Image (spheres, rainbow, N blue to C red):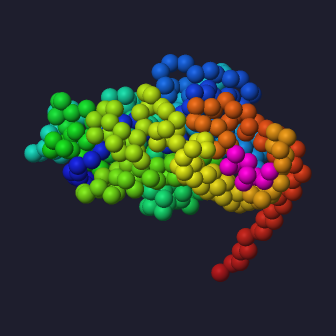
Amino acid sequence: MLVLLFFLLGSAALVLGFAEEELGFRDRDGTYYPPSGDFPADRISTIHDDLTFGLAIAAGFTVTDSHTLRIWDQLVDSEVLPSQPVSYTYGNAGFYTPPNPLLACAGKNHARQIWPTSKFDADTASVTSRFGPYSPFFHFPHLGGADLQALHDWGWGITDTLRGYEAYAWGRLTDLTLMQAVANDGCIITRTVTISMPWEAGSLEAFATYLHTLADAHSHADCVDALAAHTPPAPWGTHTVPALGDDSVYACDYNPTSPQNDDAHGREFGSTYTDTQRTIAAARAVYAELSARSWAREGVYVPLPLTATLVVSGEETTLDGALVRFVTGWDYNEPARRRAYMDSLVQALMAQPRTSVRRVYLPLAMRNP
């Protein structure tokens, strides 16, 4: 299905839900790879990485499976994470041939391709690439929307296929952002497709992908609402700026080249802004899914309730209280302190007496017709 949509607001800014922080990746064996290169390369999100690991342990997964969940959660953004002897990669199973703007954009400006961005390479990029045609689908799904439901069903293995959409945009040679393109009669296309995924539906890697998108749906909820408030509404979510450097769309204000404590993702941490409620809601939603998955399949221990009492960093708290502390205790630019707190929480969880899951598998009753 091919749909042409022309609207008045948007941009091709880099997409980041729970943005990467100035903290490197730590492998399963504890090897630390410090950040290098331009931000956000070689950085991780303490929400997608560290928090996911701690929540998986609390939900009753093994340490091995908890690492798998947090690594593939982070890979949705990072695409590649360092390891020895081989790096972790999300990969792709192929992309569709993009629309030909000479045919699809008749009567519209299409001299410059704006989305996917010039950083996207169909031969090497992850299917979840933030620069690619599926970027809005994976990084800006809607809470309660069909896109998030499709990711849920694929992540759980309810369906073997993932139905989503591609996003494309062209503008004039002088247009640099999506907003500039559409304000000057640019060409915007979305196309519904079956997305070829490199991981089996229902696998832990697929489930981790869903967890990432669930968290992003919370992280980007206010931004998506801001876009929907415009007339006509934007056909897909992105961090929108009228021009590069413009911060007038408050809920979507994020510049990946210069992240700040008071931008859209910086406000998701610390004790200053109510935006932290999105982060707390995301953590609780992710934990609910991890607990359900643990009970149903891979878990070896009964998930702890959020009311479970723990001693973390010498202080008595509940599991939910620890989640809130993780989010609100330190500003965005203090990720090392967040990681240290999560390490203490994991130690407390590992020391906690746990009840093993006992599953009863009943044979399928069969009879001859």
- Residue 244 is situated, as x and y percent measured from the top left of the image, at 31, 32
> Residue 346 occupies which quadrant of the picture?
top right
Could one spot residue 238 in this view of the protein? no
- The verdict on residue 126 being magenta is no
Instruction: Out of 156 and 302, give the one closest to the viewer.
Output: 302
Write the residue at 68% across / 49% down: 324
On the picture, is 29 further left or further right than 113?
right
For the record, the magenta segment spans: 317-325
On the picture, is 252 further left or further right than 313?
left
- For the C terminus, give its image quadrant: bottom right
Main secondary structure type of the part rendered in magenta: helix
Q: How many marks?
A: 0
Instruction: Out of 263 and 352, give the one closest to the viewer.
Output: 263
On the picture, is 146 further left or further right than 268?
left
Instruction: Out of 176 and 134, give the one closest to the viewer.
Output: 176
Write the residue at 32% across / 36% down: 246
Could one spot residue 355 in this view of the protein? yes
- The verdict on residue 320 being magenta is yes
The correct choice, above or below, for 29 with respect to 72 in the image is above
Write the residue at 73% across / 52% down: 321
The correct choice, above or below, for 307 with respect to 258 in the image is below
- Residue 41 is situated, as x and y percent measured from the top left of the image, at 51, 25
- Residue 260 is situated, as x and y percent measured from the top left of the image, at 49, 33
Write the residue at 67% across / 41% down: 329
- For the N terminus, give its image quadrant: bottom left
- Residue 220 is situated, as x and y percent measured from the top left of the image, at 46, 49
Instruction: Residue lying at the far front in this picture: please name it.
Output: 272
